Image (cartoon, rainbow, N blue to C red):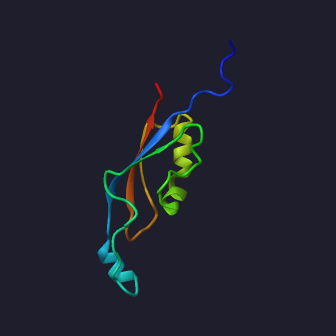
Amino acid sequence: MRPPMYPAFDRIKITVVKKLHHKDLIEKYTDTGDWNSCSRFEEGQEFMVRGDAPWNMPAGFCGWAWADMQKIVWGMSRGGPRRYVTCCTDGFRPVVFLLERVADE
């Protein structure tokens, strides 16, 4: 039997670790100052990215946050670090994510 053409790739679990809200910056640098924290995610929420298609954004995920981390997810699925912490680039109300490689058994 021939070995598979491509090696198995790890899935990536994305966990929402923390939602931040920089009220001081919002009040200082915006016109309205009445922004709320991100409503897209909840702390503890989890998403899974398939190892064979790490370029596909998980259902229900924020497109802006995905654009910020997609290259990291892709690299991790191909053997990069086992764990990585990153955040979206919203300076007023960033969301912090834990990325973890999950090997299929």
- Residue nearest the observer in this picture, 14 or 89: 14
Most foreground residue, 31 or 105: 105
Left or right, residue 104 beside residue 38: right
Q: Position of residue 105 (x, y in %)?
A: 46, 24
Give the residue at x 31% y 51%.
Answer: 44
Residue found farthest to the front? 59
Q: Nearer the viewer, residue 80 or 77?
A: 77
Residue 37 in percent (x, y) is at 34, 69
Q: Specify the quadrant of the image occupied by residue 38.
A: bottom left
For this orientation, the residue located farthest to the bottom is 31
Q: Compared with residue 22, is residue 31 higher up or lower down, i.e. above or below?
A: below
Q: Position of residue 55 (x, y in %)?
A: 59, 48
Point 51% across, 34% down: residue: 10
Above or below, 94 against 30 in this view is: above
The residue shown at (38%, 71%) is 92
Specify the quadrant of the image occupied by residue 67.
bottom right
Q: How many marks?
A: 0
In the rendered image, the quadrant that contains the N terminus is top right
Left or right: 41 with respect to 61?
A: left
List x then y, in percent, for residue 14. 42, 47
Which residue lies at the image location 56% right of the left edge and 49% below the top edge?
Answer: 71
